[in-house]
Image: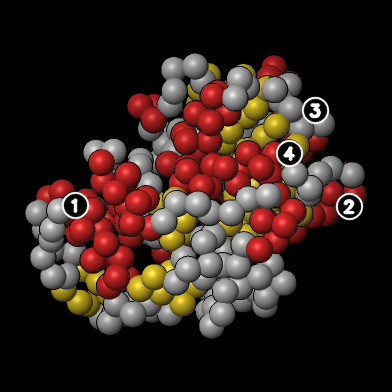
């Protein structure tokens, strides 16, 4: 089919592009290259350098997509706090533009949302029905995008899907973006530098390998409409993550600790049982294996 991947030159997007090409799809990438990189793109994909905050109707008219994987986003929590207007422009208004451009061609949208930033603290693995308590404008804007998808499904009879990602890691992730703690740790290990852990290191996260996330996107493209968690259900502390990253790298020193950052969650873990039931998807990559693959790729 003809597929458009917004944010397709970025970390997750470039892997999705490769998977779509591998199954024989015609793939077009819409990316303003703010954080995406041309070198991430497979040669068979066509790049359209475009910001989703700008009108998309004309571009989509020429592409006539059947599937839109919407990954373009303002994804930095700190930036969302400092510049909430920018966050809303990209994540809310940009998503609306994508939805309307897709609707004109009857295209299905798979939307990348977030688990941790929407659910807040998770004493137990969060299900899709858990209380939603965003602690940042980023979480709120992603939740707003989800609600627009659900409204379009009711109003226009579309079959869009929202995927709430846990902490995604893998090759091509940028160390400079908040949330990419694996990329940050591996960047320090490659440089022979000491990593800094904010707080006591007991904070727990659900780390899901990018290859598994890509599988979830492909399953969602053909599965029932709705909202699904995409995670492992396994809690790993930041201290344990550092140990595993150091093991993948063949060794590393002890990290140093700094004051906790305001607003950091203590625990964020997702229950992906609904995705397994409805989409036939579950995470298959153990953390140690995913970290080895990330390290061996040559770029965190």
Q: In the image, what residue occupies the spot 57% across and 42% down?
A: 215
Residues at marks 3 and 1 touching, judged by CB atoms closer than 8 Å:
no
Q: Circle 2 sits on which residue?
A: 154
Alpha carbon distance from label 4 to label 2 = 19 Å
Residue 21: image x %, image y %?
55, 23
Marks 3, 1: nearer the viewer: 1
Of marks 4 and 1, which one's residue comes earlier in the chain?
4
Of marks 2 and 1, which one's residue comes earlier in the chain?
2
- For the N terminus, which image quadrant? top right
Residues at marks 3 and 2 touching, judged by CB atoms closer than 8 Å:
no
Circle on res. 105? 3
Lateral position of residue 17 relative to residue 54, left or right? left
Secondary structure, mark 3, is loop
Marks 4, 2: nearer the viewer: 4
Lateral position of residue 214 relative to residue 275, left or right? left
Of marks 4 and 2, which one's residue comes earlier in the chain?
2
Q: In the image, what residue occupies the spot 35% across and 40% down?
A: 172
- To which quarter of the image does residue 238 belong? bottom left
Circle on res. 249? 1
């Amino acid at each position: 089919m003809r597929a458009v991947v917004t944010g397709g030159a970025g970390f997750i997007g470039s892997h999705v592009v490769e998977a779509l090409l591998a199954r024989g799809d015609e793939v077009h990438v819409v990316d303003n290259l703010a954080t995406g990189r041309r070198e991430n793109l497979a040669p068979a994909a066509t790049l359209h350098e475009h910001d989703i905050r700008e009108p998309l109707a004309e571009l989509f008219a020429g592409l006539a997509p059947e599937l839109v994987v919407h990954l373009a986003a303002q994804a930095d929590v700190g930036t969302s706090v400092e510049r909430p207007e920018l966050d809303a422009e990209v994540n809310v208004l940009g998503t609306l533009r994508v939805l309307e451009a897709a609707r004109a061609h009857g295209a299905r949208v798979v939307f990348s949302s977030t688990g941790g930033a929407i659910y807040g603290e998770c004493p137990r693995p969060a299900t899709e029905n858990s209380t939603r308590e965003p602690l940042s404008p980023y979480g709120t804007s992603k939740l707003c995008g989800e609600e627009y998808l659900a409204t379009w499904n009711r109003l226009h009879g579309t079959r869009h899907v929202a995927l709430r990602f846990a902490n995604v890691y893998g090759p091509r992730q940028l160390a400079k973006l908040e949330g990419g703690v694996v990329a940050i740790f591996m960047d320090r290990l490659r440089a022979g530098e000491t990593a800094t852990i904010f707080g006591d290191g007991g904070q727990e996260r659900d780390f899901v390998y990018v290859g598994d996330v890509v599988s979830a996107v492909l399953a969602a493209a053909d599965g029932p409409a709705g909202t699904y968690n995409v995670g492992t259900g396994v809690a790993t502390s930041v201290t344990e993550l550092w140990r595993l990253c150091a093991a993948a790298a063949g060794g590393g020193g002890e990290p140093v600790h700094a004051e906790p950052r305001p607003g950091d969650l203590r625990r964020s873990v997702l229950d992906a049982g609904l995705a397994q039931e409805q989409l036939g998807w579950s995470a298959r990559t153990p953390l140690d294996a995913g970290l080895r693959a990330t390290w061996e790729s040559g770029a965190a």
